[in-house]
Amino acid sequence: MRLDPILRSRAYIKVERPPELWKAGTEDSRFLPLLGEAIAAALASGAPLRELTRHASDSVVEFPEDGDDLVAPQPAEYVAITVRAPTDLGPDDKWHPTSPCRRGLLFTQFGE
């Protein structure tokens, strides 16, 4: 999926991205709702729309050189997307992919 048109689709949200962004290995029907939820979460927490920034970057995850076990994400090439805004989203807890699922802003445990 090409992200360029999606990142430019809302002129009122700033965009930061590399000059050449990789294609994402997903479908727009899966990605767009997630991006919308990230934007909605920032707005619901009081961030002004004019201060939102969508950030896209190309990322490479490699095996650790020091022999440590690799947990997550798996080594590969990824496109990372974030939505930044000046807002308080609660405690600055650290989350790790191997942590148990918990209720929170964007992480919801299903079936409760």
Image: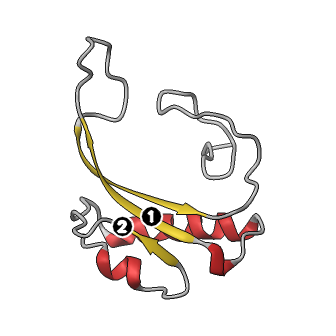
Q: Residues within 10 Å of mark 2 (few under 14, many from 20)?
A: some
Residue at image point 25% right, 73% down: 2
Residue at the disc numbered 1: 55
Judge from the rendering whether residue 95 lies leftward or rightward of residue 74; answer left or right. right
Q: What residue type is labelled 2?
A: Arg
Residue at image point 23% right, 26% down: 63
**Residue 22 pos. (x, y %):** 22, 63
Q: What element carries label 2?
A: loop
Toward the top, the furthest residue is 67
33 versus 62 height, above or below: below
Q: Do the residues labelled 1 and 2 touch (CB within 8 Å)?
A: yes
Name the quadrant containing residue 31.
Answer: bottom left
102 versus 50 height, above or below: above
Check the picture and name the quadrant holding the C terminus. top right
Q: Is mark 1 on a helix, strand or loop?
A: strand
Q: Can you tell which mark lies on residue 17?
A: 2
**Residue 36 pos. (x, y %):** 54, 71
Name the quadrant containing residue 71.
Answer: top left
